[in-house]
């Protein structure tokens, strides 16, 4: 009779083929995320915190803030020390953005993939914004407004650069 562990290992090998896909580490990150959300919910309930009813404005603000926070965490040169244990510097990938290669195996690789992917870290950033709106709504609104303004400013910088290029000017 095949044990559960043997079945899981067989499935992991069949899934990953010749690639290094650290499924156990991914499962660990999913468990950590679930525990984090569960902890937030338990703390909110224990503190008798009322859950917010986000307005469309709040959703738009959090959308822009999540976008910006995700890019700051995953691509910004200043936050590279946070990613350094999991990545190797490769170069730049755009204005004020780094290209980094994930290094290591297992949990190190899984965390590296998480912290270098704005799409992947976005769920964690959005969850942080939501938790903030429960426990510190005013401070969170200030932080999300700041990140949203920065996000809009970044888009305007790209639009300005594109307009200059179209007009044949250089910056």
Image (tube, rainbow, N blue to C red):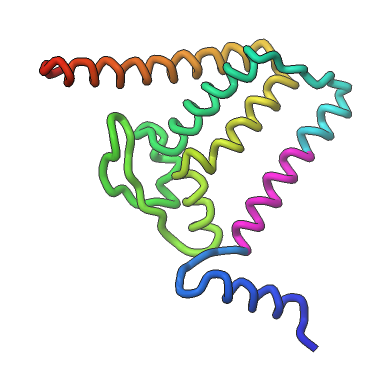
Q: Which residue appears at 76% of the width and 76% of the height?
A: 4
Residue 119, given in percent of the width and then of the height, sits at 51, 40
**Magenta segment:** 24-38
Q: Quadrant of the N terminus?
A: bottom right
Q: Position of residue 72 (x, y in %)?
A: 44, 31
For residue 54, side relative to residue 74 (left or right): right
State whether residue 4 is above or below residue 61.
Answer: below
Residue 50 point in image, percent of width and height: 84, 19
On screen, 27 above or below 90? below
Q: Quadrant of residue 91?
A: top left
Nearer the observer, 30 or 155: 155
The front one of 114 and 156 is 156
Quick check: 98 left or right of 112?
Answer: left
Is 56 positioned to the left or the right of 99 in the image?
Answer: right
Residue at x 55%, y 36% (from the top left corner): 122
The residue sitting at 49% across, 33% down in the picture is 70
């Amino acid at each position: 009779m095949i044990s559960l562990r043997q079945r899981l290992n067989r499935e992991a090998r069949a899934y990953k083929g010749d690639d290094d896909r650290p499924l156990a580490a991914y499962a660990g990150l999913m468990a950590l995320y679930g525990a984090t959300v569960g902890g937030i919910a338990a703390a909110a309930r224990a503190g008798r915190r009322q859950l917010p009813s986000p307005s469309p404005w709040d959703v738009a603000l959090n959308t822009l803030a999540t976008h910006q926070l995700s890019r700051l965490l995953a691509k910004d040169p200043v936050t590279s020390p946070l990613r350094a244990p999991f990545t190797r510097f490769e170069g730049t990938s755009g204005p004020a953005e780094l290209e980094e290669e994930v290094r290591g195996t297992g949990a190190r690789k899984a965390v590296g993939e998480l912290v270098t992917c704005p799409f992947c870290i976005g769920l964690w950033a959005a969850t942080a914004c939501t938790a903030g709106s429960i426990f510190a709504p005013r401070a969170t609104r200030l932080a999300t407004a700041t990140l949203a303004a920065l996000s809009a400013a970044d888009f305007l910088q790209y639009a300005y650069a594109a307009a200059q290029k179209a007009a044949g000017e250089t910056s």
